[in-house]
Amino acid sequence: MNKLTAYFKDSYKELVQKVTWPSWDQLQQSTMIVLGATLVITAMVGVMDLVASNSLKFIYSLFKG
């Protein structure tokens, strides 16, 4: 039990004293970068899905008929 208590005390001490937390402005900037990247990647995947779907529909129509 002493090891567990020491672990939590050390973890708390590290989070409070040793970790450098970002400022509010840095946090907002990082959040905007992540949101922007997420939107770009989502759009790219959507376009790839649309192209693949239409390509497969075209290929299936060649053999259907």
Image (spheres, grey):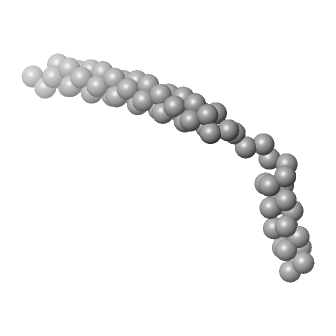
Residue found at the very far left of the displayed protein:
65
Q: Residue at x 51, y 31 (%)?
A: 32
In which image quadrant can residue 56 be found?
Answer: top left
Q: Percent from the top left, x then y, of residue 23?
A: 67, 38
Q: Residue at 84% across / 52% down in the picture?
A: 17
Find residue 19 and report its horizontal and vertical position in percent: 80, 47
Q: Residue 61 sits in which quadrant?
A: top left
Residue 41 in sight: no
Question: From this viewpoint, which residue is outermost toward the front?
Answer: 24
**Residue 25 against residue 21 in the figure, above or below:** above
Q: Is residue 29 left or right of residue 49?
A: right
Q: Give the x, y percent position of residue 43.
A: 38, 26
Which one is nearer the viewer's eye here, 57 or 20? 20
Q: Which one is nearer the viewer's eye here, 42 or 57?
A: 42
On the rendered structure, is 31 left or right of 57?
right
Residue at x 47%, y 28% (from the top left corner): 36
User: Can residue 49 be seen?
Assistant: yes
**Image quadrant occupied by the N terminus:** bottom right
Looking at the picture, tell me which residue is in the foreground, 55 or 28.
28
- The quarter holding residue 20 reads top right
Relative to 46, say whether 22 is above or below. below
Which corner quadrant holds the C terminus?
top left
Name the spot of residue 9 as percent of width and height, x first: 85, 67
Report the side of 14 relative to 60 (left or right). Answer: right
